[in-house]
Image: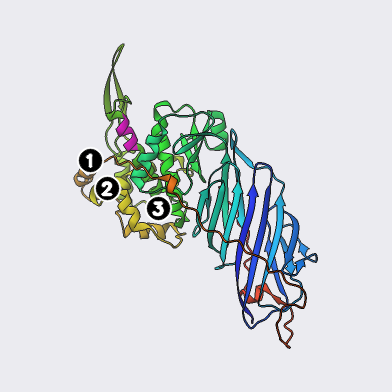
Amino acid sequence: MVSASAEIQYQGTMDESEVGMNTSIQLECDDPCPVSRWSLTWNLPEKAQIIEIKDSLGEIEDYQRTSKSVSITTNSEKRYNETVQIWMKIDEPAQEIHDDLYYRKMSIPSFSGEKTTGEIKVEDLVSGKVGFGFGSSFVNDEFRFSGEGPTNIRVNFGDGVEKRYYQFFGEERENSTEAYEIAVGTTGLVQEFERFPVAVMNNRSYNEKVNRWSSGQYISGTVYLRDDLEKDYLPVLTHETVHGLNDRFFRWDQTDSTYIDEGVAEHAEYLMKKKLFRKNRAKTGTKEIFGESKKYKVEEEDGTYVYTLESQGDRDRLWNYYRQDKEFMKNWDPREDADTREFGYAYSELLIKYYIVNNGTVRDLYSNIAVDQKIESPQQKWDFLSSHMVMEPCNFDSRNRFDNCLDEINDHDYEIVTGKPDTSSRSSLGFEEIKVPNRTRGGSGIRETVERTQVTFRQFLKGFVDYLLSLTG
């Protein structure tokens, strides 16, 4: 059996109307060599049109095309390496997110364990993401990625109103810097691109494109906000920015459970509300979790008003959750079960606040749970996190100890830390274009009397990975 290695490189352009892509597949024969023909089957993006396929001897005209792939055999000549290039285009309009903000998503086929790189030029590039295990950079309308094996990408682009850390589409918002700096100060993370795109939508559009129950949402590099948040605008923007910063960090988490991500976002939102109230920029401050209602007395021109904020999460329900050995938080996702939504948000925030009170900062927690292996099972994730933090905070047999623990969490004076990263120093991944050797027939210089007949790429890569990723957004 012939052994070999490969390197796959993508170069392309994207805009609102079409995608142009050149895929270079560099093949290296390891042993035994040389090889007279190379054959491979390559997956193609949906609706892709092939413009040209060539190798080092010139154009390859005899290829077999299906709706999802193309089968290629190189021109005959014994050699130790070969480069196949596939030029294609996709005449498909980009998906509009909102008011001149667009996105495209694509699968990036490759071979398992083989180096895969890409350079995509996108006019008005704003943000994007690439799959687990890949590095990426966003500089000067150029999205680069590098890793091993197949992956998927999403690119967001458009021309909005630029602020320091955000680009707004729809209605422009003020004071956004505060939200970003609390999110960064809380997590210690910085995104790979310069600004988060923010789509500010009226309720009808938001309900149709996002959901009916939330005030904001982060999806694959873009923040979505309702346009009528008023006093909740900065807290919600802070919350969703944390999700954006967490996006790359938590790519090892392949489960649908979101309690850590949501807990940190809830805590950062709490800090923003605390700041606004202390600066006399909000009538009310924070609410308790699994606690009591809080009253805020406000002097206004026409009299004195008392605003009451109910606790998020019911304390008796948490007590019963522990006593009855319930476990639904292991799989909790606010999108799935409205009945556990409020409880889940409160429990998630309690996880983080308990850690802060007893162990350290969110940044300390993140330094302990940074892993480079995927975790796909909710139970495996729960067990992993259990080795670094208490997953059932305030769970005591004594009701008195339980109550005292929750009171301590709610009474704690949580520190507000802001972060001001230097986004201008963001670096770009290196990119070295694969060159196709310029060979002529009979000019390889190889003296080999044993003719090696067609060797399929499936054989020497120990099994072709029949792969076509579908994105979840």
The residue beneath circle 2 is 356
- Is residue 23 within the magenta segment? no
What range of the chain is rendered magenta? 270-276
Q: Amino acid at mark 1?
A: His
Q: Earlier in the sequence, mark 3 or mark 2?
A: 3
Q: Amino acid at mark 2?
A: Ile
Q: Position of residue 211 (x, y in %)?
A: 52, 37
Q: Which mark is residue 352?
A: none
Quick check: 356 left or right of 128? left
Structural distance between the alpha carbons of marks 1 and 3: 26 Å
Front in this rendered view, residue 269 or 117: 117
Q: Amino acid at mark 3?
A: Lys
Q: Secondary structure at mark 1?
A: loop
Front in this rendered view, residue 264 or 207: 264
Task: Tell me what residue is drawn at x 25 percent, y 52 percent.
Answer: 359
Task: Tell me what residue is drawn at x 20 percent, y 48 percent.
Answer: 398
Asked whether the viewer can see residue 110, the reply is no
CB within 8 Å, label 1 to label 2: yes
Q: Position of residue 46 (x, y in %)?
A: 69, 53
Q: Quadrant for the N terminus, please.
A: bottom right
The residue beneath circle 3 is 330
Structural distance between the alpha carbons of marks 3 and 2: 21 Å
Q: Secondary structure at mark 2?
A: helix
